[in-house]
Image (spheres, rainbow, N blue to C red):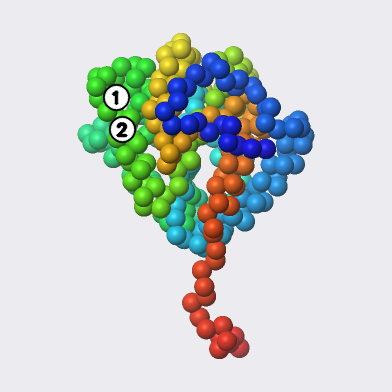
Amino acid sequence: MSFESFCLKPGRPVRLSKIDPGSTAAFRGGKRRATAVLSQHRAELDRLQELFYADGRRGLLAVLQGMDTSGKDGTIRHVFEGVNPQGVQVATFKAPTPEELGHDFLWRIHPHTPLRGNIAIFNRSHYEDVLVSRVHQLVPRRVLSARYGEINGFERELTTEGVTVLKFCLYIGRDEQGRRLRERLKDPSKQWKLSPSDATEREFWPEYMEAYEEMLQRTTTAWAPWYVVPSNHKWFRNLVVSRILIETLRGMDLRYPPPTVDLATYRIE
């Protein structure tokens, strides 16, 4: 399964209406086979993450962005199930606090970027400030427009410092979102996830799609491109994200560092 078809190209217009959120065309096989393949992916990701941690020369940032119920939590839970939590951190960004609003919009993001050897996962991210802020007109348009460039500069700085940035837009359809919300209503184990905004934000679906399209077009760069992942099928979403992570880590020429002791003379009595 090639992941290149999900990667956006810098400078090209983005039309989400031309992407099928229910597509699984890149994978030959159904859910049952996908479950077996994902198990293999987890084992390989576990191996690579340990090597990445030991290598310690760079960091990796995985950004998960998407509408409510698109599967950000589920992706983290299923894709990263077997990795060593010592080298993986998850940060979630909700509505800014009064203190955060008193600083520039990227101020709260910096402390959560990954150390060398670590993987940081953003469950929502700095992109909230060009999505929610645009849809609800929380800042003037000129401020919003400047933020795209600030984000690109921020991610450029990260890559210069040795951080690989992977950005996943988990793309679901409006009907699928409605189905998942109705499922939550019926399931006591999921009802706690419901919030008043789930229903109200659905009313702004067209505005959000326009905001996503502009965001994707203006912040897809050579150093930090976006991957638009069809996510109506959770199993397919997990396969795509895990495969991209694996291929990215494989391409880093990772290696274990040399021992810090003289193996020829090292003795254990």
| Pointer 1 residue | 145
Question: Which quadrant is the N terminus positioned in?
Answer: top right
Dot 1: few (<14), some (14–19), or many (≥20) neighbours within 10 Å? some
Residue shown at the point (54%, 59%) measured from the top left: 254
Q: Is residue 163 left or right of residue 76?
A: left
What is the three-letter code of the residue carrying label 2? Answer: Gly
| Pointer 2 residue | 149
Residue shown at the point (57%, 20%) measured from the top left: 19
Q: Position of residue 65 (x, y in %)?
A: 47, 31
Where is 114 relative to 269, above or below?
above
User: Mark on residue 45?
Assistant: none
Q: Position of residue 197 (x, y in %)?
A: 44, 18
Residue shown at the point (58%, 36%) measured from the top left: 4
Dot 2: few (<14), some (14–19), or many (≥20) neighbours within 10 Å? few
- What secondary structure is found at the residue carrying circle 2? helix
Q: CA distance from mark 1 to mark 2?
A: 8 Å
Is residue 198 something that shows in the picture?
A: no
What is the three-letter code of the residue carrying label 1? Answer: Ser
Q: In which image quadrant can residue 165 be found?
A: top left
Total marks shown come to 2
Q: Are marks 1 and 2 in contact (CB under 8 Å)?
A: no
Q: Is residue 225 left or right of residue 256?
A: left
Question: Which quadrant is the C terminus positioned in?
Answer: bottom right
Where is 47 relative to 258, above or below?
above
